[in-house]
Image: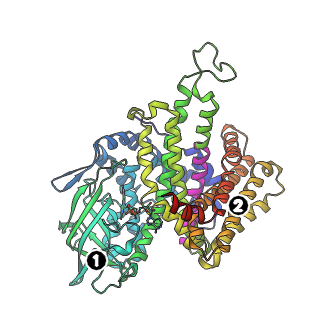
């Protein structure tokens, strides 16, 4: 069984010493003193470590089964879900009007990392429910909010998002599911595939948010509407009633996240309600999708964090070979593998990624809170950074899990140690919720130039302001400020290259994944520079010394990747278009 220790100390450092949530002029943040955040995070952390982590391997081994039309979740999932629900932990940041705790989103994000690191497949049931809550909260009528939200907040009912069809994955213009008006409502007909948490036995109802076309819909994505389609119809008194005409066709066999039911959903004239305006469904669904993208980025971090804990412990125990400079443990037949430079490289790559990514996810969450409170600039940054959070953190999160597996050698390939599950589970995060190639395309094709480049300029202003504010700080200069400045210049040069080649879309798109990674590195560098400053200002104990050492490693060993990404971007479209045409 893979043990998990919630990183409470690091979370406290990032929230209170780096982001200084308690001092931010954001509604709800004034109440976020250390004691309050610790009380919430300690409890969710305890449940994650004691209940969810032990079920991770069970979920992987047993998977979900379709029995007589109903999906059965793995042993222990029902009880664990009830525990979270009864503790009120499924609605941390949801509105108190609907039964939520009303805390800021950033605390929900922090608690989400613990649950996902302990058991990614399990965490997705409540994660998707939260997304459905947000979509209905933002786009629903008062009557819809009153009908659906209390049960979703409490996770008595759970939510799903239904976009994908066999012929319509990335390209939603190809979507065929139909919605026919029927009295006050609609009848939905069509098939959706790969629907996460599509059905299960942990809640009394499942509320599907389904994209479909009305009869008069214009072609393409402008003709898509969004519908609320419950598994069980809801009686006038709010209780679940008879079954709706929606069923599970099958549960997919897949590479990982076996504890999450990935379903084919068949809608055979199922009763549904329109959510938002007709033909504006994609816009409404984007509320759910943007939230899901932030959550999936967090999954990349969380899986890397869980895997790193196992790898770091194993490297201290496993005895193989002596240190190159002579035995580190005299009298022992061999040293722990942590003495070897290459094993240290593997561990430091993971640690530097995980801690930088944690700060990045939480910083992005504070921007989401600021945006919700009406800060348009914060909203612009969220829009720009969302593909980076999703794409960069999941690419690197998977890479980090593979590095953790490498530390285990052959034992990492054997299921018993639990590490290979992290590799299998984390892989999907690069694919779903818009494959990472699409995130890069969104970043370069839409976000970079939106509003005349206002948001990327705001990002550069932020970096420059940090550099200026701290330019006299000799403790930071060589190790943190100079590398951040150089990496930020690489990012600027890449953006200028795209601008100069604006007439050749392939030139930008050929470099889009490099740009996403270049941007991700600069975001983590900014986080590391901010963390270094906070660590230097604090008493020099083991925690802060380790923080500084890890930050120096990131800046000197990982951040130079920006130069390679820039060089690749500058080769333009030719290598991938013309050479590829000859090579294939
Ligand atoms: C386990 C699992 C859970 C899922 N959960 C859900 C869910 O809950 N709800 C839901 O609706 N869907 C869900 N999905 C579907 C998932 O979001 C899609 O698989 C994903 O969006 C990609 O679509 P596709 O598989 O059809 O790939 P395709 O669209 O066929 O893409 C294949 C490849 O081509 C690339 N590509 C496609 N078009 C372009 C382009 N224009 N430019 C550049 N590259 C391009 C893609 O990046 C990708 O690498 C899930 C999938 C899985 C496997």
x then y, percent, for residue 53: 41, 41
**Ligand 1 location (quadrant):** bottom left
x then y, percent, for residue 496: 69, 70
x then y, percent, for residue 245: 18, 69
Residue 497 seen: yes
In the rendered structure, does residue 365 fall within the stretch colored magenta? yes
Q: Nearer the viewer, mark 2 or mark 1?
A: 2
x then y, percent, for residue 337: 58, 27
**Which range of residues does the magenta coloring cover?**
350-372
Q: Earlier in the sequence, mark 2 or mark 1?
A: 1
Left or right, 420 with reference to 577: left
Residue with the mark numbered 1: 273
Q: Is mark 1 within 8 Å of ligand 1?
A: no
Q: Residues within 10 Å of mark 1 (few under 14, many from 20)?
A: many
Placement of 277 over or under 271, stated as above or below: below
Placement of 70 over or under 381, stated as above or below: above
Residue 6 seen: no
**Residue shown at 72% from the left, 56% from the top:** 484
């Amino acid at each position: 069984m893979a043990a998990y220790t919630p990183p409470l100390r690091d979370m406290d450092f990032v929230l209170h010493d780096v982001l200084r949530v308690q001092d931010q002029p954001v509604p709800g943040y004034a109440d976020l003193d250390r004691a309050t955040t610790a009380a919430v995070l300690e409890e969710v952390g305890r449940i994650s470590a004691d209940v969810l982590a032990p079920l991770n391997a069970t979920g992987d081994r047993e998977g979900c089964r379709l029995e007589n039309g109903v999906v059965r979740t793995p042993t222990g999932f029902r009880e664990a879900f009830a525990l979270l629900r009864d503790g009120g932990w499924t609605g941390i940041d949801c509105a108190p009007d609907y039964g939520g705790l009303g805390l800021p989103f950033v605390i929900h994000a922090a608690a989400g990392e613990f649950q996902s690191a302990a058991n990614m497949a399990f965490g997705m049931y409540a994660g998707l429910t939260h997304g459905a809550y947000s979509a209905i909260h933002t786009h629903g009528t008062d009557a819809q909010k009153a009908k659906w939200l209390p049960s979703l907040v409490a996770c008595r009912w759970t939510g799903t998002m239904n976009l994908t069809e066999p012929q319509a994955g990335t390209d939603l213009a190809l979507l065929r599911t139909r919605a026919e008006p029927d009295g006050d409502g609609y009848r939905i007909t069509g098939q959706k595939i790969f629907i996460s948490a599509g059905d299960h036995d942990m809640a009394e109802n499942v509320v599907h948010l389904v994209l479909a076309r009305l009869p008069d819909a214009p072609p393409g994505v402008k003709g898509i509407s969004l519908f609320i389609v419950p598994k069980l119809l809801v009686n006038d008194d709010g209780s679940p009633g008879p079954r709706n005409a929606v069923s599970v066709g099958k549960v997919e066999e897949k590479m990982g996240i076996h504890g999450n039911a990935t379903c084919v959903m068949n809608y055979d004239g199922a009763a549904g309600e329109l959510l938002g305006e007709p033909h504006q469904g994609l816009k409404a669904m984007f509320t759910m999708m943007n939230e899901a993208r932030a959550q999936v980025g967090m999954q990349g971090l969380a899986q890397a964090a869980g895997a790193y804990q196992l790898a770091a412990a194993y490297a201290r125990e496993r005895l193989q070979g002596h240190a190159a400079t002579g035995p580190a443990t005299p009298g022992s037949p061999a040293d722990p593998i942590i003495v070897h430079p290459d094993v240290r490289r593997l561990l430091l790559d993971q640690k530097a990624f995980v801690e930088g990514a944690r700060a990045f996810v939480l910083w992005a969450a504070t921007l989401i809170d600021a945006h919700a409170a009406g800060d348009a600039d914060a909203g612009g940054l969220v829009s720009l950074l969302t593909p980076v959070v999703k794409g960069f953190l999941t690419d690197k999160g998977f890479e980090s899990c593979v590095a953790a597996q490498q530390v285990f050698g052959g034992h990492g390939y054997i299921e018993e140690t639990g590490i290979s599950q992290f590799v299998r589970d984390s892989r999907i995060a690069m694919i779903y919720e818009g494959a990472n190639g699409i995130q890069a395309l969104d970043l370069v094709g839409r976000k970079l130039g939106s509003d005349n480049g206002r948001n990327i300029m705001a990002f550069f202003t932020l970096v420059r302001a940090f550099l200026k504010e701290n330019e006299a700080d000799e403790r930071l200069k060589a190790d943190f400020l100079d590398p951040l400045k150089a990496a930020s210049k690489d990012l600027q040069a890449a953006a200028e290259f795209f601008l100069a080649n604006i007439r050749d879309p392939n030139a930008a798109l050929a470099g889009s994944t490099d740009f996403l990674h270049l941007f991700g590195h600069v975001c983590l560098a900014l986080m590391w520079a901010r963390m270094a400053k906070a660590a230097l200002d604090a008493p020099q104990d083991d925690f802060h010394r380790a923080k500084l050492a890890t930050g120096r490693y990131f800046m000197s060993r990982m951040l130079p990747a920006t130069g390679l990404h820039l060089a690749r971007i500058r080769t333009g479209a030719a290598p991938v278009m013309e050479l590829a045409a000859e090579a294939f």
